[in-house]
Image (cartoon, grey):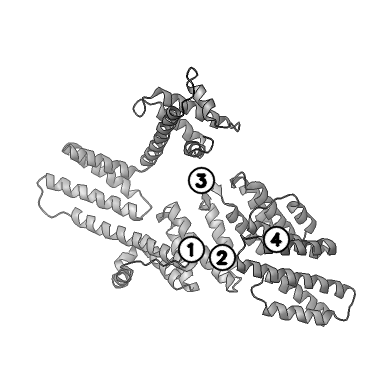
Amino acid sequence: MQNSKLIDLLQRLSLKERKQLQIFIHCNLFNTNQKVKDLSTIILTQINDKQGVKFNSNTISHLLEPDLSYNERRFNNFLSKLLQLVYQFLSMQRFQQQASWQQAALLHELTERDAQRHIKAALHKWELIDGKEDQRGMNYHLSVANRNDYQDRFELEQNNRRYHPFLQRQSDQLDLAYLVEKLRIACDMQSRNTIIQATYHCHLLPEIKALLEQQDRYLQHPNIKTYWHCLRMLEQPQTKNYQLFKDLLQKHSICFSKGELRTLYQYSLNFSIKKINSGDSSFYQEIFALYQVMLEKELLLVGNQLSQWSFKNIVTTSIRLKAFDWAAEFMDQFQHKLAPEEQFNALSYNLAALSYAQGDYRSALQHLQHVEFTDSSYHLGAKIIQLKSYYELEEEEAFLSLIAAFRKYIKRNKQISAYRKTANAHFIQLAKELFQLKIKVKLQDKSALRQWRQIKLKLDQSAPVANKDWLEKNVKIFAKQLLG
């Protein structure tokens, strides 16, 4: 029972939601089964107490029915009924947040009952609700189309056979709903085709493109225009297309749901990352700005949690731009948004990265000393920080020992791709040779210049290479020392 779907779902609710759920379950309108009411009280009380209680079926069954022996089938039946009530509560909670859905349901019932005296007022209220809606995606246009359908039928019921605009509006709104959703899907398909080499094909997209190019009136709608230019950026990843899309996204962000905004900003991030990978380091500032906006709009939070990878990427970007104070403040502010089981490792790793960037190599090593990284990405990153710290501290024995351990880890770990194994193997070898060169330069060994040239040649010819910018920086340092 500890890992049951019911417990998992209840633990994902906020304290406020669990209190509302308790009221819902105890309402006879929705549930008349007293045993299910009692079961919900027992389980929710234990969850709210946060005592780390193990949800044992026998124990809870005894609390529920102390005079009866445990019957697995009977107990599971109670659990199943309770789970269905939780589902019903969540769906109703969502329904209550959507005023237009409520009006649509009301109009359906009023129409079924031929309650003509009530329909006009309900339609007017629905129109006011739609008028206050900022988000202009598919659901908005479908709501307006649905409302105009009811208005058209209402006019016909009044034997008003003259021309009225509702049928035309219904048709026009359905067109807008189709276009905005089709463009949204086209962007998603294009993105996936690029990133994961998928083979999605968006049917009728050529016809839609021709329509939008010929009839500019559709591009007057902010959602359609934004998705249109997003698609152009994804298909033709040029800076001018990116900038136009980003400007539209900033201008019309209020017109999109949080889920849509999260995806659209991710497209912007993907574009910027590609620019960096192609050698345009100026886009680090662009990524930094995008992350700041996404944090402000809470687009990086899913279930009120920040993923450890977003946390790491944000810190890495701010370090790259030497925004050290901002990085420290960010970690302090958002560490509690990480999943509890990820907080220690994520915070320790990123504090180590920040300490290293600030030149505090011993603090960097200290942050990593007692951390167990089970994920290969963290493990690789931690070893690289350790290796570079030993290099800067000139701790030869520790450096060479880590080199050997690092090689074994890469060779044996099956989670690491062949590409990353090669890139890190090249880095390890060149880092070792740089350390040897460092000793020779310090001892004024005459062979240092020859070894420097060999390292430079290997660095130019080796591909791929992890941490290439760090290697190039140190090669340049030795160039000044050896060549003057």
The residue singled out by tag 2 in the image is 286
Q: Nearer the viewer, mark 1 or mark 2?
A: 1
The type of residue carrying mark 1 is Tyr
Query: Mark 4 or mark 3, which has the lower sequence index?
Result: 3
Q: Disc number at residue 64? A: none
Q: Tell me which numbered mark, 1 or 2, is placed earlier along the sequence.
A: 1
Using the numbered discs, state the Cα–Cα distance from disc 1 to disc 2 in whole angstroms.
13 Å
Gap in angstroms between the C-alphas marked 2 and 3: 26 Å
Amino acid tagged 3: Gly
SS at circle 3: loop
Nearest to N terminus: mark 1 or mark 3: 1
Q: Which mark is residue 303?
A: 3
Q: Hey, which quadrant is residue 435 in on the image?
A: bottom right
Pointer 1 residue: 267
Image quarter in which the C terminus is found? bottom right
Badge 1 marks a residue whose secondary structure is helix
User: Which residue reaches farthest right?
Assistant: 443
> Which dot, 2 or 4, sits closer to the camera?
4
Cβ–Cβ under 8 Å for marks 2 and 4:
no
Q: Residue at x 22, y 50 (%)?
A: 148
Residue lying at 35% horizontally and 59% vertically, measured from the top left: 181
